[in-house]
Amino acid sequence: MTAAIVERLSAMPGKAARSFRKSMASRPDRPWYGLNENTDTLKWIAMVTMIIDHAAAIFFPREYWLRMIGRVSFPLFCWCLVVGADYTRNIGVYALRLLGLAVISQPAFMVALNHGLWDFNIFVTLLLGLIGIAGIQRGHFEAPALALAASCFFRMDYGFRGVACILVMYALRRNPALLAVGFTLFCAAWGLGASYNAPFYPALRYWGGASMVVGRLLGSQVRMQSLAVLALPLILIPTRRRRGTWGGGKWLYLVYPAHLWILYAVKAMR
């Protein structure tokens, strides 16, 4: 189905169709499964929604709609990791880069978001996911099991479910329809065991009247972390262009520690 849609779009006349054909021709030496490989643009979206989420957590903890926006961020980081694992020429160097980012980011993660020394930041979660993927690629299936086990024994951002999210995405990446269904079910289950549950009632109760009824109904059915599924439409956009128009690449992740230091400085001046 995805292939047929891509073929029809490619056959259309005009500037937009030419741009689309160009994006489809990017990196023909790698397998493409009809999903979004424009990781630079996805990283920017993930960074912006993450900053909104962290700013809300620090300065506006009762503004639940801002925290809801932030649920989009982590799944996009996971998907960029999955694409990167398929494209990287040296997964060991990729892992070392994530480890370096984890070390650099840890002090900012601790002071800005009030975490302890043994509460690890998101790059440790991503690193464990990459280790699991590397094991799958090489037929060493004990690696993903060990990565999941490590996420249970050590505290880290998104923890066991975060590593599992990466592995689920990697396992289902070859079939867009299966990825859509599998990730949706995963997000539904993810929300049941996560914090920040029932976001809709607090978000709607200020409007009074019927919105309070709607808020209670949605709050009993939809949990905050389940809203990670909102990242899915972005992942399903079919494009092979791996470089966006705003730059980025491997160094874009330095925004993570930088924004935490900025948020901490603003918090300290209040």
Image (tube, rainbow, N blue to C red):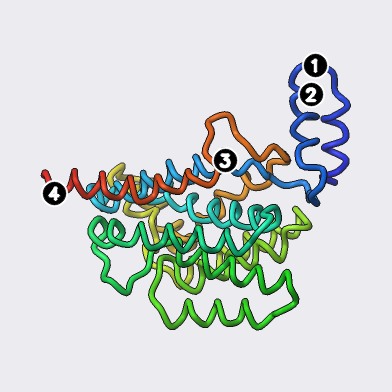
- Which badge, 4 or 2, is on the more N-terminal residue? 2
The residue mark sitting in front, 3 or 2, is 3
Inter-mark Cα distance, 3 to 2: 21 Å
Residue 230 location (% of width, % of height) = 55, 49
Q: Is residue 226 left or right of residue 206?
A: right
Q: Position of residue 66 (x, y in %)?
A: 36, 46
- In front: 24, or 59? 24
First-in-chain label (4 vs 3): 3
The residue beneath circle 2 is 17
Earlier in the chain: of badge 3 and badge 2, it is: 2
Quickly name the residue at label 1.
Answer: 14
State the SS at label 1: loop
Q: Are marks 4 and 3 in contact (CB under 8 Å)?
A: no
Mark 4: amino acid: Ala
Query: Distance of mark 1 from mark 4, alpha carbons?
Result: 53 Å
- Residue type beneath disc 2: Ala
- First of labels 1, 4 by sequence position: 1
Mark 1, residues whose alpha carbon is within 10 Å: few (<14), some, or many (≥20)?
few
Picture quadrant of residue 171: bottom right
Relative to residue 149, is residue 240 drawn left or right?
Answer: right
The numbered dot on residue 268 is 4
Q: CA distance from mark 4 to mark 2?
A: 50 Å
Residue 210 visible in rendering: no
Amino acid under label 1? Gly
| Residue 117 spot, x, y in % from top left | 28, 71
**Residue located at (29% from left, 53% from top):** 57
